[in-house]
Structure formats: structure tokens, C-alpha cells
């Protein structure tokens, strides 16, 4: 009889243990998993100097101001030609990106790593275009720019008018000596 009582209490202990274990696993998974946030564009930006040195940056977003990732720095000399290219991919799983656009530019900034996008008063190169991008479709461009004056510059590619709650960008700092 004592054995059967022990067996019964063991069964009750097992059920409580299983419930508690399940509850703990659910709680931990809810705490560890960050809320899903749908991304719209994947961007890859590559800048290459005349000696073959290159830097690359990938999609980031604002807020916070300046994005989440620190920008890589490409160091070149005055008079050097910098080649840059980008590819933007629509990774939004729910459809087209109608009447969206992309803008790319090189603009002088006050210092490397500046968080705020500089005013467009000192733009070295600028371009933009509109598109209707299907899911998984890509769009991109290749450009060259000659850096004629020393200073710190921001090379940036950004999505515009995507009709979403935020825009995406990729950026590289250029240090021209």
C-alpha cells in the first residue's frame, strides 16, 4: 500500500513538474525572442579606391539617428577616383514596392561618423530613380566619382517613398587626404 501511495504522489509530482517546465519554457522563449519586424529592403553598398582597397556596408535604418551600425571608412587621396556600386533587393514578403525610389549621394560632412545626414549644400555626386519592385527583385547602379578636395564625406544609398514606417539605407564614410 505504501508503494501505491508513493506511485500516486509521484504521478502528481510528474504532472506538476511537466506543467511548470512547460510554463518556464514558454516564458523564456517569449523573453528571448525579439518582436518580429518586417524588413523591406536589403542593401549592399561597396566602395573601392584606386588601389583596390574597398569597404562595404549593408542595410540599416533610422531611428536611431545615424542608424544602428557604425559606418566603415574608406581612406583615399585627393584626386583619386572612387568606384561605388549598390544593389537593393525587395525582401518585403507581402508584395510590390510601388512608386518607391532610391537616392544615392556623396556629400561633405563635418567629421567621420557624423550621426546627422549633412545638408545637401556640398554634394559631390547625386542620383535617384523610381521603381515598382516585385518581391525578391533587385535594382542597383555603379558610379565613379573623383574626390577633388580633402575632407570627410558621406557616401549613402537610401530608399525613399516606400510607404512603410521607416526607410532603409547603407552608408560608408570617405576620408580624403
Image (cartoon, rainbow, N blue to C red):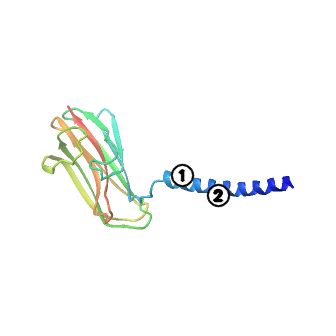
Q: Is residue 9 left or right of residue 102?
A: right
**Of callouts 1 and 2, the N-terminal one:** 2
Instruction: Please tell me whether residue 54 is drawn above or below residue 23 in the rendered image.
Output: above
Q: Nearer the viewer, residue 84 or 155?
A: 155
Q: Is residue 109 left or right of residue 56?
A: left
**Occupied quadrant, residue 96:** bottom left
- Coordinates of residue 55 in the picture (x, y in percent): 34, 39
Numbered-mark total: 2
Which label sits in the foreground, 1 or 2?
Answer: 2
Query: Residue at 33% across / 34% down in the picture?
Result: 53
Is residue 70 shown to the viewer in this render?
yes
Q: Nearer the viewer, residue 68 or 97?
A: 68
Assign a secondary structure to mark 1.
helix
**Occupied quadrant, residue 88:** bottom left
- Coordinates of residue 168 in the picture (x, y in percent): 32, 55
The crowding category of the residue bearing disc 1, from other C-alpha atoms within 10 Å (few below 14, some 14 to 19, many at least 20), is few
The residue tagged 1 is: 28
Query: Residue at 58% across / 53% down in the picture?
Result: 24
Quadrant containing the C terminus is top left
Find residue 19 and name its label.
2
Q: Residue furthest front?
A: 2
- Coordinates of residue 138 in the picture (x, y in percent): 39, 57
Query: Gap between marks 1 and 2, in whole Å?
Result: 14 Å
Is residue 49 shown to the viewer in this render?
no
Quadrant containing the N terminus is bottom right
Find residue 120 and name its label.
none
Q: Is residue 66 left or right of residue 37?
A: left
Assign a secondary structure to mark 2.
helix
The crowding category of the residue bearing disc 2, from other C-alpha atoms within 10 Å (few below 14, some 14 to 19, many at least 20), is few
Query: Residue at 85% across / 53% down in the picture?
Result: 2
- Coordinates of residue 162 in the picture (x, y in percent): 31, 63
Amino acid at each position: 500500500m505504501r508503494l501505491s501511495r508513493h506511485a500516486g504522489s509521484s504521478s502528481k509530482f510528474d504532472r506538476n513538474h511537466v506543467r511548470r517546465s512547460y510554463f518556464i519554457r514558454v516564458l523564456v522563449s517569449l523573453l528571448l525572442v525579439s518582436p518580429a519586424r518586417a524588413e523591406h529592403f536589403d542593401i549592399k553598398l561597396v566602395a573601392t579606391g584606386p588601389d583596390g582597397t574597398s569597404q562595404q556596408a549593408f542595410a540599416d535604418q533610422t531611428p536611431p539617428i545615424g542608424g544602428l551600425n557604425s559606418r566603415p571608412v574608406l581612406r583615399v587621396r585627393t584626386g583619386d577616383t572612387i568606384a561605388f556600386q549598390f544593389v537593393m533587393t525587395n525582401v518585403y514578403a507581402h508584395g510590390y514596392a510601388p512608386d518607391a525610389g532610391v537616392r544615392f549621394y556623396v556629400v561633405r560632412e563635418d567629421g567621420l561618423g557624423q550621426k546627422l545626414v549633412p545638408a545637401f549644400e556640398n554634394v559631390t555626386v547625386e542620383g535617384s530613380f523610381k521603381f515598382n519592385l516585385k518581391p525578391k527583385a533587385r535594382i542597383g547602379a555603379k558610379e565613379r566619382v573623383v574626390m577633388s578636395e580633402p575632407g570627410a564625406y558621406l557616401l549613402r544609398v537610401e530608399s525613399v517613398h516606400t510607404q512603410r514606417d521607416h526607410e532603409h539605407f547603407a552608408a560608408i564614410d570617405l576620408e580624403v587626404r
